[in-house]
Amino acid sequence: MNKSQSISVGIFFIIGISLLWVVQRQMSDKAVQASEGYEVVARFENLLQLRVGDDIRMAGVRIGSVQYTGLKDRTPTAIFKIDNEFQIPSDSLASIGMAGLLGNNLVSIDMGSSPTPVSPGGEVKTQAGYDINHVVNEIGALSQQVGGALKNFEAILGAQQGEEGMFQTLGRLLKENDKKLTQTVSNLEAITAQLASGEGTLGKLLMEDEIYEELKTISADLQNTLSEGEALLSDTREIVAHVKTGQGTLGGLIYGETDLAVEVEAMIADLREFSAKLNNPDSTIGKLLTDDKLYGEVQGLMRKANQTLDGLGDSAPISAVGAVAKPLF
């Protein structure tokens, strides 16, 4: 078969497929027009690719076909022609779906449970269906995002020519610090060996049971101390609360209005009055404390009294009275 014959066969094949499709559509339209049944209305947000002649199915059973699709009052509206032998419950929901991945659209009715059917000329409730075009667009957008992420990952790994990737950088660092890493590993091995042998403070803590028991004892003592501190704090709180109620001597002094508090207040007032008199230079006690002249007179009187007492030792009882009176008068 030469090239021209192949082209001719292809053209006739395409024409044949087109003729079969036209005949099928005409037969479907005639079947829609000729079938008996009643009409119901369904209003959707979007009719998607729904066309006249598409099947109406309820619970997987074909119950009619689409009679009309268009806009009524700016609302996407479809008219279904339902076979007379089927009734649609009034709480059913209709949605636009697909017969298969590559098949025609159809209307799928989720059958409700209401005993009242949709009357001829009535309206069926609808819900949004899945748009295969929207799904394809989302898949395309997702593939673009995945492609961008792969490009970024390739850039990180150094897939671009002339750039150092993450693994290349890590390998270079390991190679440059090979000696340091080896020394570090050796030091860690030595440290772990010392710990395992019980050397050093940390090794003893890890390996010797005596230190462990001592730590347990210290921990127990600390717990007892904390318990005693908590008990003391609790007692202190109770004492403070008792004092705040005004009970007891201290509570009465600070918060209460008892006789003791009144007496203490009176005593404090007397002390204040006494100290005021001491500071007053006109009072007797104030003069004694502040007047030097009176202090000199008292000293002279004391000297005369001493002289009188000295004269009494040598005088008779009768002359003693005179001896006492003479210095005084």
Image (tube, rainbow, N blue to C red):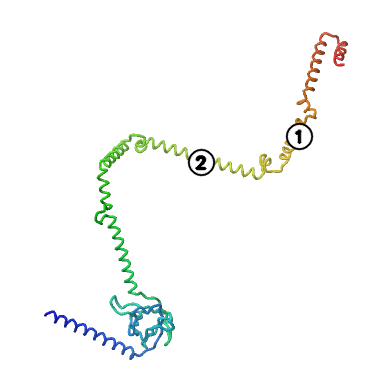
Q: Is residue 74 visible?
A: yes
Work out whether residue 282 or residue 205 is closer to the camera in this orientation and state it: 282
Q: Secondary structure at mark 2?
A: helix
Percent position of residue 37, x then y: 37, 89
Work out whether residue 325 or residue 135 is closer to the camera in this orientation and state it: 135
Which of marks 1 and 2 precedes in the sequence?
A: 2
Relative to 171, residue 215 above or below: above
Q: Residue at x 33, y 69 (%)?
A: 138
What is the quadrant of residue 215 in the picture?
A: top left
Q: Residue at x 82, y 8 (%)?
A: 314
Work out whether residue 178 or residue 316 is closer to the camera in this orientation and state it: 178
Percent position of residue 108, x then y: 36, 79
The residue that mark 1 highlights is 273
Q: Residue at x 14, y 81 (%)?
A: 4
Percent position of residue 150, x then y: 29, 60
Quadrant (top left, top right, bottom left, bottom right) of the N terminus = bottom left
Relative to 238, residue 309 above or below: above
Q: What's the distance in space between the residues labelled 2 and 1, CA to CA?
A: 51 Å
Work out whether residue 167 or residue 68 is closer to the camera in this orientation and state it: 167
**Crowdedness of circle 2 by 10 Å Cα count: few (<14), some, many (20+)?**
few
Percent position of residue 201, x then y: 36, 35
Q: Amino acid at mark 1?
A: Glu
Q: Amino acid at mark 2?
A: Ser
Quadrant (top left, top right, bottom left, bottom right) of the C terminus = top right
What is the quadrant of residue 63 in the picture?
A: bottom left
Name the disc covering residue 227, or none: 2
Q: Secondary structure at mark 1?
A: helix
Outermost residue to the front:
162
